[in-house]
Image (cartoon, rainbow, N blue to C red):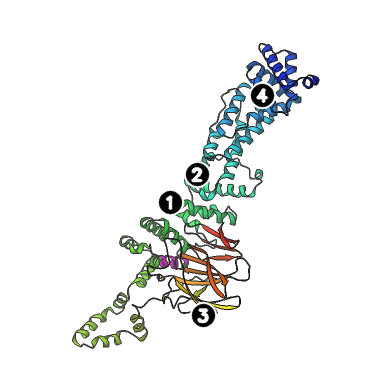
C-alpha cells in the first residue's frame, strides 16, 4: 500500500480520500476503512493529517465509527493521541470544557481513555493558571457538568478541580489578595489537595498560608495566635505581612484579633509602636478609639503596651488625644492600669503653667497677692516657688527644643545607628580624609539643612529631602518634636568606602531614612543621594540590603545592586 503514496502526489491522495468517504457514507466497508486508516498513518507526522481528519468529521457516521475503532485498537493509539491533542489545543477554560462535553456526548467511551483524562486535567489546569481571572476560571470548572446522562464524570472532575486549585494557588499573589479573594478561594477549595503531590516548596508554603487565611476569615476564631502556630516561623512572618495589607481597609472590631496577630513579636508580646503607627495611618478616630478600648479590656498591659500607647497619645500627629470626645472616653476607662496611663499622659502633655498650678496650687493666690502689693514680689515669688533646676527649665520654654531620643525597651536596639545630637558633628573618613556633617550650625534644633565639611574645610550645604507627604521636619525645616536623628556607615557594595545612612525616628517608630554615597571629585568630597524612604520601624542593614516596615505596614527590602537600590 505504501507504493500508492510514493507513486501518487499528496493532492491525488486527498482526492482519493474524499472519494472513499463519499462512497462509504451510508455504510463503511472494510476496504474503505483500511484505506482511511492507512492514509492517516502515512501522514500522521505531517500537517495534512488534521486536514484529513477534518474531512472525516464532516461525515458523522464514518467519524463515529473510525473514532471508536482506533480507540479500541491499541495499534492506533498514536492516531487518537494526535486527534485529542488537536482538539484540546485551546487556552480558554470555557472552550476546553465545551470540547470535553462534545467528545463525551458522541464518544462516551473516551471517559476511560488515559490520554483523554490526562489532556482534560492538564489543559484545564494550564488554562486556570494563565487566566486573567483565575477565580472565575476555577469557578467555571467547579460548575461544569457533562450533558450526557450515561457518563459518570465525577472522578475526572474531582481531579480537574484539584489541579485547577494547584494552578490557582501557584498564580495567586498573597500580597495582592483581598477578603473577597479569600472567600472565593474558600468556596473553590476542594479540601483534597495532598501536599505530598506538590513538588514546589513555594506552592506548598502558599497553600499552607491560604488554608490558615481561609480558617481565620471564614470560621469563628477563638485565638488567632493559636491558629498561626500551625505554620513555620517563615510562613508566619509572611502571613503577618499579608494580614497587614488585607486589613488596611477592614479595621472592624471583628478583626481586632487579626490586627494584633499581624504585629506579634513571637516573644509573648506585640510590636506595639508599629501597631499604633499602622492604625493611626489606616483607621479613623472612631476605629482607633474602639481598638484602644478593646485592647484595654482584652489585653494584658505589659510595659511594651504602656510605653507605646503613651508615646502614641503624646506625640503622634494623628493622636486621638487631640479629639476632645475620644479623650473623654479614654478618661472613662476604669481599669487601674489604664487610668494610670491616662494620668501619665495628662501630666506629661500639660503645659509648664498647668504643671506648676497642679503642683503649687495652694500657693498661687499668695504669689499673685504678693505681686499686686509689692512690685518686686514676683521675683520673690519666683525664688520661693522654684528651686534652681525648675527655674532653669521654666526659663527655657520659649527656646528651641533639643531632640529627645526615642525611649527604648530593654530588648530594643538601634544598632548600628548612633544618636546624633545638635552641635556634635558626624565624623567619617573618605580615602583617609576626615569629613564632617553638621546640623547644629545650620539649625540648632536639628533641621533638614546640613553642612558637609571636607578635609580642605570646604563647606557644602545639602538637605534631607524625601518624596513623601509626611516629613520629620516642619514647614521651617526644623525637626519636629519627638523625632531624633541617628547616623551610621554601612558598606553596601563592599567597595571599601561605606555609604552614609541617616535616620529620623520618633517614639511611635515613624521613620525616615536617607542613604548617601560619598563621591571624591577633584580632591573634594560630595554626597550622592541613593535612597530616601519613610516607614514604621528603624532600618535594618544586612550585607547589601536595607529593610524596614513600610508605610503601608508590610516589610520592605531594598538591595544595593550596580550602584543603586532596587526594591525586592
- The numbered mark, 2 or 4, whose residue comes first in the sequence reads 4
**Disc ID at residue 357:** none
- Disc 3 to disc 2, C-alpha distance: 61 Å
Residue 230 rendering spot, x and y as whole percentages = 58, 52
- The numbered mark, 1 or 2, whose residue comes first in the sequence reads 2
Residue 64 rendering spot, x and y as whole percentages = 65, 19
- Disc 3 to disc 4, C-alpha distance: 85 Å
- Disc 4 to disc 1, C-alpha distance: 56 Å
Residue 23 rendering spot, x and y as whole percentages = 68, 11
Q: Which of the pair 222/107 is nearer the observer?
A: 107
Q: Which residue is identified by label 2?
A: 181
Q: Quadrant of residue 471?
A: bottom left
Q: Residue at x 42, y 53 (%)?
A: 251
Q: Which of the pair 147/558 is nearer the observer?
A: 558
- The numbered mark, 3 or 4, whose residue comes first in the sequence reads 4
The secondary element bearing badge 2 is classed as helix
Q: Is residue 176 visible?
A: yes
Q: Which residues lie in the magenta part?
A: 304-312
- Disc 1 to disc 3, C-alpha distance: 53 Å
Q: Which residue is identified by label 3?
A: 457
* Quadrant (top left, top right, bottom left, bottom right) of the N terminus: top right
Residue 43 rendering spot, x and y as whole percentages = 73, 25
Q: Which residue is identified by label 1?
A: 249
Amino acid at each position: 500500500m505504501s507504493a500508492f503514496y510514493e507513486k501518487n502526489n499528496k493532492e491525488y491522495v486527498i482526492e482519493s480520500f474524499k472519494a472513499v468517504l463519499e462512497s462509504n457514507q451510508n455504510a463503511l466497508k472494510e476496504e474503505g476503512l483500511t484505506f482511511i486508516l492507512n492514509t492517516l498513518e502515512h501522514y500522521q507526522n505531517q500537517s495534512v493529517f488534521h486536514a484529513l481528519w477534518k474531512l472525516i468529521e464532516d461525515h458523522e457516521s464514518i467519524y463515529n465509527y473510525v473514532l471508536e475503532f482506533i480507540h479500541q485498537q491499541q495499534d492506533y493509539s498514536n492516531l487518537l493521541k494526535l486527534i485529542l491533542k488537536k482538539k484540546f489545543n485551546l487556552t480558554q477554560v470555557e472552550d476546553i470544557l465545551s470540547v470535553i462535553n462534545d467528545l463525551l456526548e458522541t464518544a462516551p467511551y473516551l471517559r476511560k481513555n488515559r490520554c483523554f483524562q490526562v489532556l482534560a486535567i492538564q489543559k484545564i489546569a494550564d488554562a486556570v493558571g494563565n487566566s486573567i481571572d483565575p477565580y472565575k476560571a476555577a469557578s467555571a470548572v467547579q460548575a461544569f457538568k457533562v450533558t450526557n446522562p450515561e457518563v459518570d464524570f465525577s472522578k475526572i472532575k474531582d481531579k480537574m478541580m484539584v489541579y485547577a486549585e494547584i494552578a490557582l494557588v501557584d498564580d495567586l499573589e498573597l500580597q495582592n489578595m483581598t477578603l473577597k479573594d479569600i472567600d472565593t478561594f474558600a468556596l473553590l477549595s476542594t479540601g483534597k489537595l495532598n501536599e505530598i503531590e506538590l513538588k514546589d516548596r513555594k506552592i506548598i508554603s502558599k497553600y499552607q498560608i491560604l488554608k490558615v487565611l481561609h480558617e481565620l476569615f471564614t470560621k469563628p476564631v477563638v485565638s488567632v495566635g493559636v491558629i498561626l502556630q500551625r505554620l513555620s516561623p517563615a510562613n508566619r512572618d509572611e502571613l503577618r505581612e499579608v494580614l497587614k495589607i488585607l486589613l488596611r481597609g477592614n479595621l472592624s472590631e471583628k478583626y481586632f484579633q487579626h490586627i494584633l496577630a499581624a504585629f506579634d513579636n513571637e516573644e509573648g508580646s506585640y510590636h506595639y509602636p508599629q501597631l499604633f503607627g499602622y492604625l493611626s495611618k489606616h483607621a479613623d478616630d472612631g476605629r482607633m478609639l474602639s481598638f484602644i478600648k478593646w485592647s484595654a479590656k482584652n489585653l494584658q498591659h505589659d510595659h511594651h503596651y504602656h510605653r507605646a500607647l503613651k508615646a502614641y497619645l503624646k506625640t503622634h500627629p494623628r493622636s486621638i488625644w487631640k479629639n476632645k470626645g475620644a479623650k473623654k472616653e479614654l478618661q472613662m476607662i476604669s481599669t487601674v492600669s489604664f487610668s494610670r496611663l491616662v494620668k501619665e499622659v495628662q501630666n506629661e502633655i500639660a503645659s509648664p503653667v498647668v504643671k506648676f498650678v497642679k503642683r503649687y496650687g495652694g500657693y498661687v493666690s499668695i504669689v499673685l497677692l504678693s505681686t499686686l502689693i509689692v512690685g518686686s514680689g514676683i521675683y520673690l515669688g519666683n525664688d520661693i516657688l522654684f528651686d534652681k533646676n525648675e527655674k532653669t527649665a521654666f526659663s527655657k520654654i520659649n527656646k528651641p527644643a533639643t531632640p529627645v531620643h526615642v525611649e527604648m525597651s530593654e530588648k530594643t536596639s538601634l544598632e548600628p545607628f548612633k544618636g546624633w545630637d545638635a552641635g556634635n558633628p558626624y565624623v567619617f573618613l573618605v580615602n583617609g580624609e576626615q569629613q564632617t556633617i553638621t546640623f547644629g550650625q545650620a539649625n540648632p534644633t536639628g533641621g533638614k539643612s546640613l553642612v558637609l565639611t571636607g578635609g580642605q574645610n570646604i563647606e557644602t550645604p545639602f538637605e534631607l529631602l524625601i518624596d513623601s507627604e509626611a516629613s520629620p521636619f516642619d514647614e521651617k525645616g526644623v525637626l519636629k518634636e519627638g523625632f531624633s536623628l541617628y547616623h551610621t556607615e554601612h558598606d553596601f557594595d563592599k567597595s571599601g568606602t561605606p555609604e552614609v545612612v541617616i535616620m529620623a525616628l520618633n517614639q511611635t517608630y515613624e521613620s525616615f531614612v536617607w542613604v548617601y554615597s560619598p563621591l571624591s571629585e577633584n580632591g573634594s568630597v560630595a554626597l550622592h543621594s541613593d535612597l530616601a524612604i519613610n516607614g514604621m520601624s528603624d532600618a535594618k542593614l544586612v550585607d547589601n540590603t536595607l529593610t524596614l516596615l513600610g508605610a503601608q505596614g508590610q516589610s520592605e527590602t531594598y538591595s544595593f545592586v550596580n550602584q543603586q537600590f532596587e526594591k525586592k
